[in-house]
Image (cartoon, helix red, strand yellow):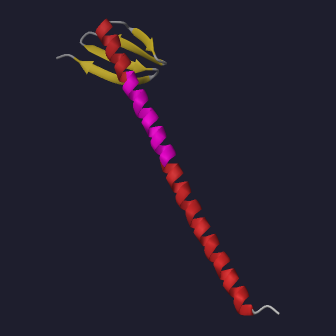
Amino acid sequence: MVTIKKQKLKAYILLEGLVALALLATITSLVLGEMDRSRTQMQESLHQQEVLNVATMAVQTGQNHLAINGVEVRMVKHDNEISIYDGQNEVLHVTKN
């Protein structure tokens, strides 16, 4: 005959283990989610940095269109203004007084 007290103890230990496992899974999920968000943010930051580097090269060389390292920028000059575009997004706008 099995005593009920031992069964309750085993069930309690099992429940405690499941709660600990759920807590570990939640913490792991949160950490991995933050790492993914951080990586995405870092990639966007590196892309913006590369766009600004290519834009600087385009201005220094006087080219209206420059494509390097998968980044393509377009420079539009008006009277006293220079605008730099990455696709349809205006990256830089300079006005001379």
Task: Classify residue 78 by image quadrant.
Answer: top left
- The image shows residue 93 at horizontal and vertical percentages of 30, 21
Do we see residue 77 in this rendering? no
- The image shows residue 26 at horizontal and vertical percentages of 56, 61
Residue toward you, 62 or 18: 18
Image height check: is 2 above or below 41?
below
Residue toward you, 85 or 61: 61
**Residue range corresponding to the magenta coloring:** 35-51
Q: Residue at x 69, y 82 (%)?
A: 10
Task: Classify residue 13 by image quadrant.
Answer: bottom right
Residue toward you, 4 or 30: 4
Q: Is residue 26 left or right of residue 54?
A: right
* Residue that extends furthest to the front in the rendered view of this protein: 1
Q: Residue at x 39, y 28 (%)?
A: 48
Please name the predominant secondary structure of the magenta segment in the image.
Answer: helix
Task: Classify residue 1 by image quadrant.
Answer: bottom right
Q: Is residue 85 left or right of residue 25?
A: left
Do we see residue 22 in this rendering? yes
Image height check: is 64 above or below 95?
above
- The image shows residue 51 at horizontal and vertical percentages of 39, 22
Q: Is residue 69 left or right of residue 84?
A: right
- The image shows residue 82 at horizontal and vertical percentages of 30, 15
Quadrant housing the C terminus: top left
| Magenta highlight on residue 4 | no
Residue toward you, 50 or 63: 50
